Image: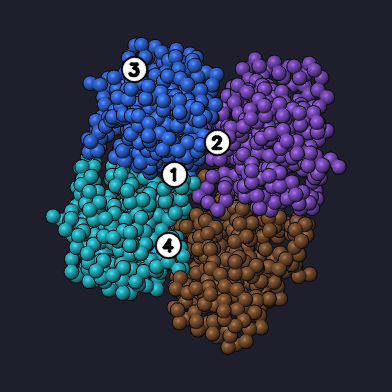
Chain colours: A blue, B cyan, C brown, D purple
């Protein structure tokens, strides 16, 4: 259930609504919008009638939410804006997260970060903890990787995006990472979702390989119900019968999510199509379809990368991608947010 | 095997190459390019050596083709241009095919064709023969539908694109249709492919619901080996586990096909995502990814359409689509080819 | 709509029902059962009320059919029995169709047929017309292949099952083949379905690679509405993300079809899993799940087969399969119908 | 790399092999078989030659393992037998795990356990921690659920199988559960896999919804490399385009896994097909295909179940399933291991 109140609702009016909800075993979630306050109620809402609220002071509207997900539904509000380091996610900005798949060494990280900063990139990605299908594959530099990321942050002023692989290391990751990535294989690791929902950091939630769009929104709902509203969704390819591409990047998810949810949606074409020479056209398509941002793998020596080199762009090719992305962004009235 | 010869090869030099091939039980397919002549050899090419040809007059190069498909491979040439009614498919033009799913009546057809012509559209689609999953569904007006399409052609000067459903009615369709569509469910109807390969009309070949990109190219190869090189491929969505969309429009196919084949690739977002209100963003994405054209379902009364109304745009919404497509086309250095 | 009448309905009672239907633009399909006559009505049945029929002489019941498919629905009757050459398909019999993928030569065909007959097999399969993804692959011996099959039929008294690839060669195939196979890639070739529905031969309809179970039943409905009720369905594997097996044999289809339809269901584990050494366990599973029969590829020299050798059993291994199938058949109260 | 040694290898011979491996930065995993000792080496095995070991005392053979997974590969040994509470998993026994989806109450649990024990069932399943797609769905009774399971264990002498949802509650679960289940959505929760690999309890590892068979074996490898060799694999359905069934139970996985790995493989037809009235035929098929066991959902009041009631059998229907499974088990030379 959703209760909409005036933006200038006096504190006592608000508290009456909250206590009404709580006394009926419902949990209220306050969502401040630009023109209204929305209060999402979860729990035993069936015991409440809309009229109970409609007659209360400062209440503008009350409605039941028709979807299985509630707080992330577009019925609650139009768009979630996330402000981080003077950069806004949403609101017509196109943000680019770039960097190598994994932290490999100080030199590697600094070289790439330096080149990216030069190009105006501020969101830097690199994995310290790497979930890998094989126990014999490179699992990341772990704590050492986080330390190197902290150095990059300090040295270049980058906004760090790195993955939290489990609940044990989540707090550690949260100390360094400005945005916490939850990987595709953890999209339905509900314990991790709940814990990241209790942390005051935006979450970058990747769609699972066999997850429907509804599954993705339900996983976002897990995070949001814990109080963390700053969730960024990410389409990164699903599993289908097609073998010509690593995954099937499902850009259909963009207009569907834009209609169903207020959360921003990014696209990772590097994992999505999985071949570096086809990342740029898919990135362009993602922007044209309405994505709020992109996550792109960039490595200075892809052929020597410890993971996913075949899908990583060189800085030179990434620069070309930025050049080709910009007119598309403009064509959809978005601003490519590079710091120049 | 591919033999490349000079563009100004004298007739006798060419004939020597052809007879060399034929005397070894190979079938030569002559493909005239803008700077060279390519001769694709199919059949028992293993009995031939490249040197047999390299030493012949006017031969520039000879190579084996590494893919399972040969004549449609990018190894043969860079791009197929198809010229039809003063409109070029390929060569940086963005062509739009629009019209209703089915021919329903003279009034319906004329109304829609009139509105589309007004907007500058010249490629008009509408099905006379409709392959339908259910024997109880509307199967099209058949011959009557073809007659109405012939009238539209005469009245509005439209280039007609309609589907040939089987070998029995192919000739009939070919008399009216400027481009012959082969539907997704017939993509591996090899007898139909062979017959349409013997007709002097461009073919619009839709990807099957469970067909890999290689399957699609192999089906195009069936047509081309019969002598008809004017094949237009069309991505229209594949079957996956996702149920939020009718199909999963697989835009990854565009860069893959552009790399693997010289054939033009169109996208049908109407069938691809299957919801009218999400056709425009997917059309924009398709253009950004590099599509040579779009096929869009337009109906003046979608709610009364005898088939696929839920995915059809009204003329008004289609006009909006064109407005939003144009800047994307420009951003990728393509020209939206409207006749104004 | 379905009208159920007594088995001993007098001719004039029956005709009244038929003319009632026809005068309302409905097409009646008479289905004789063992205890009742069922009359399926297709067409504009909404204009008719059940009461119109309930009050007529000899009518026992009248009902609307809730599924999209009507005449193949289990609501019409419990089970279709097909009697062919003194062998019954359905009715607790387990029938085995065996033979090579393709007719390759007289020697090959006679050798395999001879060995199979020795083992008690009476249903013999081999393709004369082979739909192949590649135009360069072996396309079958065609007419010559049919002639050889006719010889096998005469020499060994086998029941022939071979594929009709298109409408042009359907009549030819029907002259030799006792059961006409429609291949997976033609499952939605509706023109072919309609034509085979007008021929007096049982049809063996394979499920398409991306076809839902409902699609398969709708395709069967196409055949049945033309008057040919003897349709045998065949599960042969669908396309999924799994690459360890050629296809994903979907045995779930068996209990679903048994509940939804009265048509017999066979399983082709050779194509389904696509590796000869795993055909037997999947065949056993198919029988345990309730299949009415199996189609198994057998070749005397799999390593030299012109198509699908890797999934073909040698006669020796096939004999072993029969030995292992029999106790499973008995465990589900079915009789493995070998002629000994 | 795999080193095979005699069963009666003296301790000093064994230690020489181990220290040779360790001094080359390889980790040895000792696997005692019935006739031989196998030592799997993981790590930098490329620095070692097979000859280094072949010449050592008591070494019978040394080989490189060709698969991506090593220790779970069939190259290591033929079959893993797991002995638990006097019941053997593997070795021709067919084991049945049964019980409700979730622990709901003491009464529910005791009623079902009592009925199952009566039928000879000894492996009892019920979820205390329930990973659910929706945060609003019933999440299990958690600690209270574990307590009730401990009571069932004490009262009825059942072998308990319950799911560990995360690393935080793993130890708690391990104190009650005789076999620890890892759910489909956690199949690639690598941190959980590593932790459960360090616990002395058999692990029941369910295949993920979009996981290939190789992915499943790689996840098992994660557990085994930590020292826990007692992994039971479980096929429970994958995601495909088919919507007639909840998932597509992929029985093809059974013969593939039996060929590739020595680990036992169970099947969960309840989740696999997802409709109670079709669980029995799929269970029968699983046994026929070679499964070592089944996991079946049984609830005394399916219509009131807090989760998955539509796929749960009543005790009465489950008893029928056992009756129909037994002759199939016998037909494949397996013994249905009921305690009577």
Secondary structure at numbered mark 4? helix
The residue drawn where x is 47% and y is 57% is C133
Q: CA distance from mark 1 to mark 3?
A: 35 Å
Same chain under badges 1 and 4? The reply is no
Q: Nearer the viewer, mark 3 or mark 2?
A: 2
Q: Give residue A158's mark.
A: 3
> In screen coordinates, is B8 left or right of D334?
left
Quadrant of res D141: top right
Q: Give residue C108's mark.
A: none
Name the quarter where the C terminus of chain B is drawn: bottom left
Q: CA distance from mark 1 to mark 2?
A: 38 Å
Q: Which residue is mark 4?
A: B186
Q: Nearer the viewer, mark 4 or mark 2?
A: 2
Secondary structure at numbered mark 3? loop
Secondary structure at numbered mark 2? loop
Q: CA distance from mark 4 to mark 2?
A: 44 Å
Chain letter behind tag 1: A
Q: Residue A225's spot in the image, x, y percent?
A: 47, 28
Task: Specify whether residue B324 is in view.
Answer: yes
Q: Nearer the viewer, mark 1 or mark 4?
A: 4
Q: Give residue A244's mark.
A: 1
The residue drawn where x is 68% and y is 44% is D301
Front-lying residue, B175 or A45: A45
Q: Which residue is mark 2?
A: D137
């Amino acid at each position: 259930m959703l209760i909409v109140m005036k933006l200038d609702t006096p504190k006592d009016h608000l508290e009456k609504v909250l206590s009404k909800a709580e006394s009926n075993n419902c949990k209220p979630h306050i969502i401040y919008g630009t023109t209204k306050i929305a209060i999402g109620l979860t729990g035993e809402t069936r015991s409440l009638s809309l009229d109970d609220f409609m007659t209360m002071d400062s209440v503008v509207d009350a409605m039941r939410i028709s979807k299985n997900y509630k707080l992330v539904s577009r019925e609650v509000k139009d768009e979630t804006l996330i402000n981080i380091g003077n950069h806004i996610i949403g609101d017509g900005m196109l943000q680019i997260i770039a960097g190598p798949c994994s932290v490999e060494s100080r030199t590697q990280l600094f070289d790439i970060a330096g080149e990216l900063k030069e190009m105006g990139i501020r969101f830097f990605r690199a994995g310290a903890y790497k979930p890998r299908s094989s126990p014999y594959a490179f699992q990341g530099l772990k704590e050492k990787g986080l330390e190197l990321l902290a150095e990059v942050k300090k040295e270049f002023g980058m906004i760090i995006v790195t993955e939290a692989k489990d609940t044990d290391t989540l707090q550690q990751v949260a100390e360094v990472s400005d945005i916490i990535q939850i990987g595709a294989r953890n999209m339905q690791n509900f314990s991790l979702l709940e814990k990241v929902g209790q942390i005051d950091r935006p979450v970058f939630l990747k769609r699972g390989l066999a997850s429907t769009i509804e599954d993705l929104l339900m996983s976002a709902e897990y995070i949001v119900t814990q109080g963390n509203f700053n969730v960024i969704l990410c389409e990164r390819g699903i599993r289908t019968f097609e073998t010509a591409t690593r995954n099937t990047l499902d850009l259909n998810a963009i207009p569907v999510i834009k209609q169903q949810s207020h959360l921003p949606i990014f696209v990772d074409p590097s994992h999505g199509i999985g071949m570096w020479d086809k990342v740029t056209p898919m990135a362009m398509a993602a922007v044209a379809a309405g994505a709020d941002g992109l996550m792109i793998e960039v490595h200075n020596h892809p052929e020597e990368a410890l993971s996913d080199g075949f899908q990583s762009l060189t800085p030179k090719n990434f620069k070309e991608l930025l050049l080709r992305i910009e007119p598309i962004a403009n064509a959809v009235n978005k601003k490519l947010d590079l710091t120049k």
